Amino acid sequence: MERWKYWSTSRKISYLLIILFLLSLCLTMIVPFLNVLAISFSSSSQSMEPGVKIIPTEISFEGFHVIWKKLELWRPFLNNVIVTVCGTFFHVLLSAMAGYVLIQENLPGKKWMISLILFTMMIPSETIMIPLYIVNRDLNLLNTLASLIIYGLTSGFSILLMRNYFLSIPSSLGESARMDGAGDWRIFTKIYLPLSKPGLATVTLFEIVSRWNHFTPALLYINDDMKYTLQIALQSLIISSDATSSSDFMTPNVRMAGIMIAIIPLLLIYPFVQKYFLKGIILGATKE
């Protein structure tokens, strides 16, 4: 900030206004999160007190105990983990394989393939919702976790991002390995994948967040309570609590505990992939 004293008054005012605006935006996200966190660690009586809470008066794990064991949130949580882990693994693998294919110089019709992939990105998911439901019904995949794993198994964005990242890797590495007798699969797994950690982390993080927060596909394909994912279970608990008698009323600390259980895994994952994510999204988006 040594240059601050050389700035004009109008520039200083503009800078301060920008800082205040950004701080205001941060508060709109931080305050609600702190309120949810404080209520989730409050007792039932404290959570029903009016007003916004930032710090709980007394730490209590009652809400987490009730929603995890008595309301069995562990079951949809486990379903969510299965869908997210399996779906993300296959999504990243298939997207990386497709991206590797699209960097081959002798691939016939490569430009048409890329154009077709770009076209799929312009189709809203709502327009293919009914056809996807019919396909899952005909394949007897309704009320199975497999339907949620297959949903969005790959995407044009992920394929093109991995393709752009692979283009940043010197092609001479693959050519040298090919001269030594390595096949495409060995070149792909031993050279391109290890050198593409930022790109893989970017696609992985996007997919983890997307699948962990899946709501519409689970609402469309799953009707069995045992196969509910986390978001559907939370919605069902809140709706049933609002519609039942006072004896079955779900206190705010239980609801907020469910929200925190849904948020915590994402908060734990992001710090480990942040450095790769930022590098991968910039390079993957700008590489020609």
Image (cartoon, helix red, strand yellow):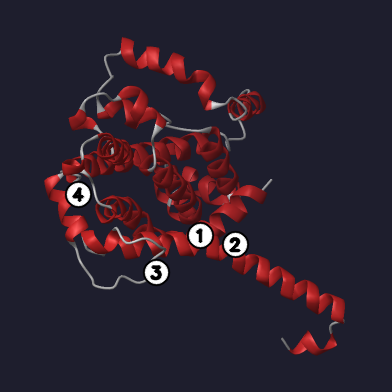
Q: Tell me if I can see residue 180 in this picture.
A: no
Mark 1 or 3, which is nearer the eye?
A: 3
Quadrant (top left, top right, bottom left, bottom right) of the N terminus = bottom right
Look at the picture and state if 144 lies above or below 199.
Answer: above
Quadrant (top left, top right, bottom left, bottom right) of the C terminus = top right
**Label 3: element kind:** loop
Compare marks 3 and 4 and give the one earlier in the sequence. Answer: 3
Which disc, if any, is residue 119? none
Name the residue at 27% across, 56% down: 253
Q: Which residue is mark 4?
A: 67
Mark 3 or 2, which is nearer the eye?
A: 3
Report the Cα–Cα distance between label 3 and label 4: 22 Å
Name the residue at 35% across, 28% down: 219
| Labelled pair 1, 2 in contact (Cβ < 8 Å) | yes
Label 4 crowd (10 A; few <14 / some 14-19 / many >=20)? many
Q: Amino acid at mark 2?
A: Leu
Report the Cα–Cα distance between label 1 and label 4: 25 Å
Report the Cα–Cα distance between label 1 and label 2: 7 Å
Which disc, if any, is residue 29? 1
Indicate the quadrant where residue 115 lies: top right
Q: Amino acid at mark 4?
A: Ile
Query: Which of these two is toward me, 207 or 37?
Result: 37
**Label 4: element kind:** helix
